[in-house]
């Protein structure tokens, strides 16, 4: 495997880490639209940097930014259609860019994937994928390349906070992917030092390097598998919720008092406002007896 292929493999690891971050954040979202958009951002940013690796970084960066803008508009349009949010893309994009973080932290859980709640994760996922791929493919720094998706994953965990069940397999898989990225990246950086050796010496050096990396990877995986349940079991404190530190965005009077909308609803009686579904076998709520005394009161006359 050449150095270029190894670096491209490291870029794939970066993309997988970004997708895993979106999967972790999706635990407080409704449906799978957020994961799909984050996966598209990871794939797009990684492919652009990998395919244009021979061009100067000053050329790749603006192209990636333009692609990010187009993909963000696409995500806004798709999420608006899925959530039934009316308005043109330009207006929705302006509103989402202005209020993305406050509404992301003040939305009811599970949050509905709509323009103002998906824009920030999509943009951050794209930036993490771009930075990690550039460091992996262009700079050949495997450890530093894993830093942007790791920061994204930490941010996802902070945003989820205590609002979702613990998914132990996700951090374990993240640790495995990081170890795999370090193995692939170390092999790619170490392969450049065997060019001056003979064929036999190259083979021996590569066998030693591969065996050492395999042993190291097995040791890391065994250590993670053994210590993760113990560490998770010893943590008795629930994580803090960042939502309590954020001021909710101001609402219009028409949103504070929905009764104002009655006249507008009455003008379109054919419009469906909400849908009620009664499950079969559900017991009806008990009806209070007028002759029975209320809690803490006297019988009604």
Image (spheres, rainbow, N blue to C red):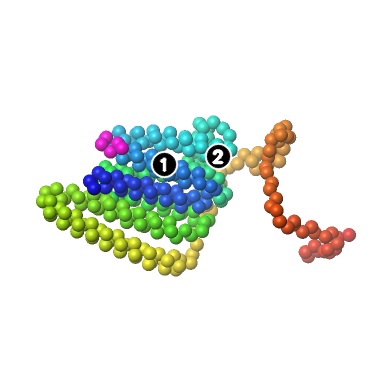
| Residue 54 in magenta stretch | yes
Q: Which of 58 and 28 is in front in this view?
A: 28
Q: Residue at x 36, y 63 (%)?
A: 224
Q: Name the residue under label 2.
A: 82
Question: Which quadrant would the C terminus be assigned to in this image?
Answer: bottom right
Residue placed under numbered mark 1 in the picture:
41
Q: Considering only order in the chain, which callout, 1 or 2, is on the residue closer to the N terminus?
A: 1
* Kind of element beneath mark 1: helix
Q: Can residue 102 be seen in this view?
A: no
Q: Where is residue 230 drawn, in percent x and y?
A: 42, 68
Q: Residue 238: percent from the left, percent from the top?
A: 50, 62
User: Which residues are drawn in magenta?
Assistant: 51-55
Q: Which mark is residue 206?
A: none
Q: Does the magenta stretch include residue 204?
A: no
What residue sits 77% from the left and 59% below the top?
286
The reply to whether residue 161 is visible in this rendering is yes
In the image shown, does 173 or 165 lie closer to the viewer? 173
Q: Position of residue 277 (x, y in %)?
A: 68, 48
Residue 47 sits in quarter: top left
């Amino acid at each position: 495997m050449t150095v270029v292929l190894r670096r491209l493999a490291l870029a794939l690891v970066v993309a997988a880490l970004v997708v895993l971050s979106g999967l972790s954040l999706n635990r407080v979202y409704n449906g799978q639209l957020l994961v799909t958009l984050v996966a598209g951002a990871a794939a797009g940013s990684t492919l652009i940097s990998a395919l244009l690796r021979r061009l100067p970084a000053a050329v790749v960066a603006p192209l990636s930014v333009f692609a990010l803008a187009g993909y963000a508009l696409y995500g806004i349009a798709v999420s608006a259609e899925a959530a039934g949010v009316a308005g043109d893309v330009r207006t929705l994009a302006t509103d989402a860019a202005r209020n993305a973080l406050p509404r992301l932290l003040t939305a009811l859980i599970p949050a509905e994937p709509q323009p103002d709640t998906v824009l920030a994760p999509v943009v951050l996922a794209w930036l993490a994928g771009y930075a990690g791929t550039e460091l992996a493919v262009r700079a050949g720094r495997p450890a530093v390349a894993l830093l942007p998706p790791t920061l994204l994953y930490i941010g996802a965990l902070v945003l989820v906070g205590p609002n979702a069940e613990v998914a132990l397999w996700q951090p374990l898989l993240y640790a495995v992917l990081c170890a795999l990225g370090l193995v692939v990246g170390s092999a790619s950086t170490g392969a450049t030092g065997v060019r001056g050796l003979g064929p036999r010496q190259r083979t021996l050096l590569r066998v030693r390097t591969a065996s050492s990396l395999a042993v190291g990877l097995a040791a890391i995986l065994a250590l993670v598998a053994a210590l993760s349940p113990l560490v998770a079991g010893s943590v008795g404190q629930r994580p803090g919720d960042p939502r309590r530190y954020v001021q909710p965005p101001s609402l219009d009077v028409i949103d504070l008092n929905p009764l104002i909308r009655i006249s507008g609803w009455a003008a379109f009686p054919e419009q469906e406002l909400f849908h009620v579904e009664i499950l079969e076998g559900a017991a009806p709520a008990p009806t209070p007896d007028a002759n029975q005394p209320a809690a803490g009161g006297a019988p009604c006359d």
